[in-house]
Image (tube, rainbow, N blue to C red):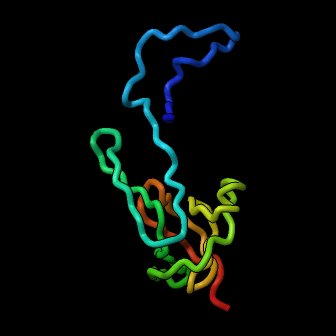
Amino acid sequence: MSVWHGNLQKKKRSGGRKRTYRIKRKFEQGTFAAETILGEPKRKFTRGYGGNRKIKALADKYASVTDVKSGKTEKTEILRVVRNPANVDYNRRGVITKGAEIETGLGMAKVTSRPGNDGIINAILISGKE
């Protein structure tokens, strides 16, 4: 099973069939989402378009958290994933994506990076330690 970003098999607006006029191309091929979870750091390196390397974070337990008021960034341990508004299933499973809210040693933080594409978890502090 694979992910495909081509539109060769789709129908026309009118509902008519689109006949394939060429074979599938490598650049139309996609991949499954990394679905970063909380755990021992694990990375996967993949070849991207144009020969670029993409780092996918499959699991991580540290985040670079920035305090917007002081402007300081600190590497801190992630205690738990509080909520993920991207997907109800990700919320249940504790998958970390951009926009996910995590609890760290410094307090609650919101993920600003894309761990599945950047290979790192960057976050900004949304509330201080009480």
Q: Quadrant of residue 86?
A: bottom right
- Percent across and percent down for residue 5 are 50, 31
Closer to the camera in the image, 78 or 99 = 78
- Percent across and percent down for residue 60 are 47, 69
- Percent across and percent down for residue 9 are 56, 18
Q: Is residue 58 above or below residue 54?
A: below
Position of 7 with respect to 90 (left or right) is left
Q: Is residue 21 above or below residue 63?
A: above
Q: Quadrant of residue 44?
A: bottom left
Position of 83 with respect to 45 (left or right) is right
Q: How many marks?
A: 0
Q: Quadrant of residue 17?
A: top right
Q: Residue furthest front?
A: 1
Closer to the camera in the image, 61 or 121 = 61
Instruction: Please give the name of the residue rendered at 35% of the width and 43% of the height, measured from the top-left corner.
Output: 48
Instruction: Please give the name of the residue rendered at 41% of the width and 61% of the height, measured from the top-left corner.
Output: 119
Quarter of the image with the C terminus in it: bottom right
Closer to the camera in the image, 38 or 111 = 38
Instruction: Please give the name of the residue rendered at 43% of the width and 29% of the height, measured from the top-left corner.
Output: 28
Q: Is residue 47 above or below residue 130?
A: above
Q: Residue furthest left?
A: 51
- Percent across and percent down for residue 124 are 55, 73
Instruction: Please give the name of the residue rendered at 48% of the width and 65% of the height, measured from the top-left corner.
Output: 59
Position of 47 with respect to 87 (left or right) is left
